[in-house]
Amino acid sequence: MPSLVGLLEQRELGARRRVDELCEEADRIQAELAVAELEWREWVIARRRVDTVLGPHGGTTADAEVAEDGRDADAPSAPRDAVKSQVPVWREELPWSVLSVDYQRILKALADRIRLGQGPLTCQEMAADFGMDVVPARVETLRSKAKRLVAHGWLAEPAPGRFTLAAGVAGTTGGS
């Protein structure tokens, strides 16, 4: 029968091995994070350049919404100096692809409603359609995005809290 001290030493050795494995994994993840952050920063620069080209009057969009510290208020714990997803003012030649995937998803849902002859959509209905939990935090995030799209001419709000594509946007073929 093994001694109590022997059993404790075995467990201590097992715990030490696990700590060493986790430290190695943490080092690997830190290295991956550094590479991913560099790639992310390159995309931020690319987005700024696109904004410069597509923004009204060839400059940066005056309606770009950046928090005081430069971080995206909607983004979950983005790396330092994150830039808010920008929504350019809608104009006829502007494709939907200039918007982030979340905004495109809202536009597509509303375009489908129009195509099916259905009326405006609430943010609660959008959350349910997107398979999200219909909880206040999710609904308010969608409402914030929808209001931003209204403010920039992509959506209309014919009744409080009910959204549809703006007249010009509704005439497009999905932002080709």
Image: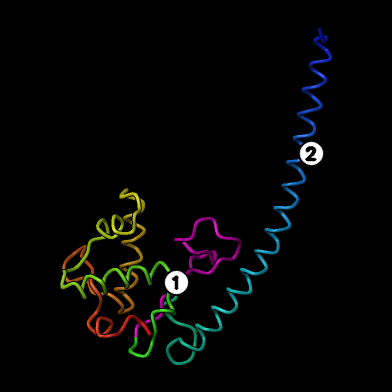
Apparent side of residue 88 relative to residue 30 in the rendered image (left or right): left
Name the quadrant containing residue 62.
bottom left
Q: Which residue is mark 2?
A: 20
- Residue at 26%, 70% in the rendered image: 110
- Asked if disc 2 and disc 1 are in contact, CB closer than 8 Å, the reply is no
Question: Would you say the magenta stretch is mainly helix, strand or loop?
Answer: loop
Tag 1, which secondary structure? loop
Q: Which residues are magenta?
A: 66-90
Residue 67: image x %, image y %? 48, 65
The image shows residue 41, relative to residue 132, as above or below, that is below
Could you tell me how far apart the alpha carbons at marks 2 and 1 are, in whole angstroms?
41 Å
- Residue at 78%, 28% in the rendered image: 14
What's the residue type where badge 2 is placed? Answer: Asp
- The colour scheme applied to this rendered structure is rainbow
**Alpha-carbon neighbours of circle 1 within 10 Å: few (<14), some, or many (≥20)?**
few
**Alpha-carbon neighbours of circle 2 within 10 Å: few (<14), some, or many (≥20)?**
few
Apparent side of residue 6 relative to residue 150 in the rendered image (left or right): right
The image shows residue 26, relative to residue 140, as above or below, that is above
**The label number, if any, that marks residue 100 in the structure image:** 1
- Residue at 34%, 87% in the rendered image: 91
The image shows residue 11, relative to residue 44, as above or below, that is above
